[in-house]
Amino acid sequence: MQGRVLIAFAVHLLTLSGLLLALAAMFAASQQAWTAMFAFLGLALIVDGLDGPLARRFDVAAVLPRWQGAVMDLIVDYLTYVFIPAFAVLTAQIMPPVASAIAAGAICVSAGFYFADRQMKTEDHFFRGFPAVWNVAVFYLLAFGVNGIAALSLVVFLSVLSFAPVEFVHPLRVRRLRGLTLAVTAAWGLLAIAALLQDLAPGFALRLGLGACAAYFLLVCIWRSSPLWPRGRR
């Protein structure tokens, strides 16, 4: 039993290591070191992909019921997916100051509603609405050099899309197209690392690859919302 407790506690520590990565990312953002900021957010993304399966594998909720791993996860996710990217939008000077404040506020508030939504996911693990992955959205803004009214429009559009009756595929948990989705997700990760190694100034080929990955998730969203999606199947 003691061994199970230690393992469960270690899984909680893994989840909470995301807070240390968030702190490092926030410091990098305060220095406008965007490459370092996204590197730390990327590590937090990896932790977020690992802790859930580990928690289910070792039945952490039953072994250590005193601490709610889901709450820990939400705290870390809001900081790394939402708050720090919003701070980056506020300080990166990609929009006029008033527009930056509006965009950052829209990110924080829309994501606050999204994280509190009891109907955030469908039974087959699709996200309802834009899933508040602002770390990815802001990565695209900076890597593609989107600024001014275009950047503000994209932020407002995605904020509104959080409440829209559309569904986005979860890259790990949706069974249908899982192999292809995982392959695209892995390719995106490699392309994102390459963009960071180029100090967020990727060339045409990298931008094309990153754009293709984003297009895949958008196309699955459109297909899912169409009558062509096989209903009643996962």
Image (spheres, rainbow, N blue to C red):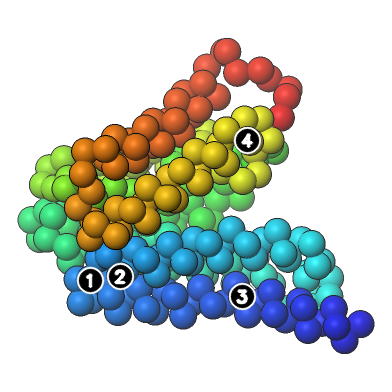
Looking at the rendered structure, the kind of residue marked 2 is Ala
Q: Residue at x 49, y 29 (%)?
A: 221
Question: Are the two marked residues, 1 and 4, in contact with CB atoms closer than 8 angstroms?
Answer: no
Q: Which mark is residue 66?
A: none
Q: CA distance from mark 1 to mark 3?
A: 25 Å
User: Which residue is under mark 2?
Assistant: 36
Q: CA distance from mark 2 to mark 4?
A: 31 Å
Nearest to N terminus: mark 1 or mark 4: 1
The spot of residue 143 in percent (x, y) is 24, 50
Is disc 2 surrounded by few (<14), some (14 to 19) or many (20+) residues within 10 Å?
some
Q: CA distance from mark 1 to mark 4?
A: 35 Å
Q: Name above or below for residue 183 compared with residue 64.
A: above
Q: CA distance from mark 1 to mark 2?
A: 6 Å
Closer-to-camera residue (146/165): 146
User: Which residue is under mark 4?
Assistant: 179
Q: Secondary structure at mark 2?
A: helix
Q: Secondary structure at mark 1?
A: loop
Q: Name above or below for residue 155 compared with residue 15.
A: above
The spot of residue 123 in percent (x, y) is 70, 38
Q: Residue at x 35, y 73 (%)?
A: 25
Is disc 1 surrounded by few (<14), some (14 to 19) or many (20+) residues within 10 Å?
some
User: Which residue is under mark 3?
Assistant: 14
Q: Tell me which corner region of the image, top left, top right, bottom left or bottom right, holds residue 60.
A: bottom right
Is disc 4 surrounded by few (<14), some (14 to 19) or many (20+) residues within 10 Å?
few
Q: Name above or below for residue 79 compared with residue 64.
A: above
Looking at the rendered structure, the kind of residue marked 1 is Ala
Nearest to N terminus: mark 3 or mark 4: 3
